Amino acid sequence: MAAPRRRRPGLPAISIGPEQGKFLQLLVALTGASCAGNRHPGGYSGAWIARALPAAGRLISLEMNPRHAAFAQGQWNRLGLGATATVISGPALATLPTLTPAAPFDMIFIDADKETYPDYLEWAIRLARPGTAIVLDNVELRPAGGSGSPGFTARTGHAAYDDHAGLRSTPRQHGCALRGWAGSDGCEEGRQEC
């Protein structure tokens, strides 16, 4: 899948590349996912996930900014993914409770405002089933500073780092950190760490 332009006026830059998109597709395939959740603006990662879902699969993405949500849905519609992928616009912490009827999710990707990662992870666990793959982007940001990307500060890095440490200390998940594009962490709900 060719990446759309990296930056459009008033829209966020794409923060994952094709390699990470392909990795998300691989996770969808490995988990046998038919219901996926995505907390990421712009629609690029969602397109990768949606393309890997089976014909009856469903992707639900959350986006706070209505303009970004409309852009993502428009992109998915142009790619022929509109029947599979849906964007819900509004603050994620307000819209996450509305996803309970759609749960459990087989795969969840979180790449959003890092300060709220601990809350997103808590909701991801609530919406998961045993075996759900939960992937968090940018967890290798260190408390002493950010990755140089816009919006990454010591505070946002601290939240992502705390989330990563939280995954390792929670007995309900099996987790690991993947080094790559600013760090990614994954866990499988319902499994104890070895």
Image: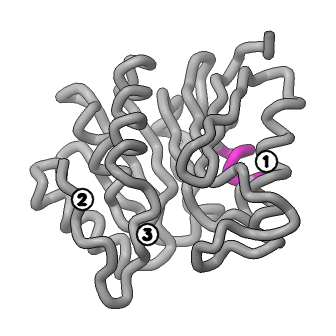
- Tell me the distance, in whole angstroms, between the alpha carbons under discs 3 and 1: 24 Å
- Classify mark 1: residues with Cα within 10 Å, few (<14), some (14-19) or many (20+): many
Question: Which residue lies at the image location 18% right of the left edge and 54% below the top edge?
Answer: 2
- Residue tagged 1: 163
- Judge left or right: residue 84 versus residue 110: left
- Percent position of residue 49, x then y: 34, 40
- Percent position of residue 36, x then y: 42, 37
- Percent position of residue 181, x then y: 54, 51
Q: Which amino acid does label 2 sit on?
A: Ala
Q: Earlier in the sequence, mark 2 or mark 3?
A: 2
Secondary structure beneath label 3: strand
- Classify mark 3: residues with Cα within 10 Å, few (<14), some (14-19) or many (20+): some
- Judge left or right: residue 26 versus residue 172: left
Residues in magenta? 118-123
Q: Main secondary structure of the magenta part?
A: helix
- Residue tagged 3: 89
Secondary structure beneath label 2: loop
User: Quick check: is 69 in the magenta stretch?
Assistant: no
User: Quick check: is 122 in the magenta stretch?
Assistant: yes
User: Which corner quadrant holds the C terminus?
Assistant: top right
Q: Earlier in the sequence, mark 3 or mark 1?
A: 3
Question: Which residue lies at the image location 29% right of the left edge and 73% below the top edge?
Answer: 70
- Mark 3 or mark 1, which is nearer to you? 1
Nearest the camera: 51 or 165?
Answer: 165
- Tell me the distance, in whole angstroms, between the alpha carbons under discs 2 and 1: 29 Å
Q: What residue type is labelled 3?
A: Ser
In this rendering, the count of numbered labels is: 3
- Residue tagged 2: 3
- Classify mark 2: residues with Cα within 10 Å, few (<14), some (14-19) or many (20+): few
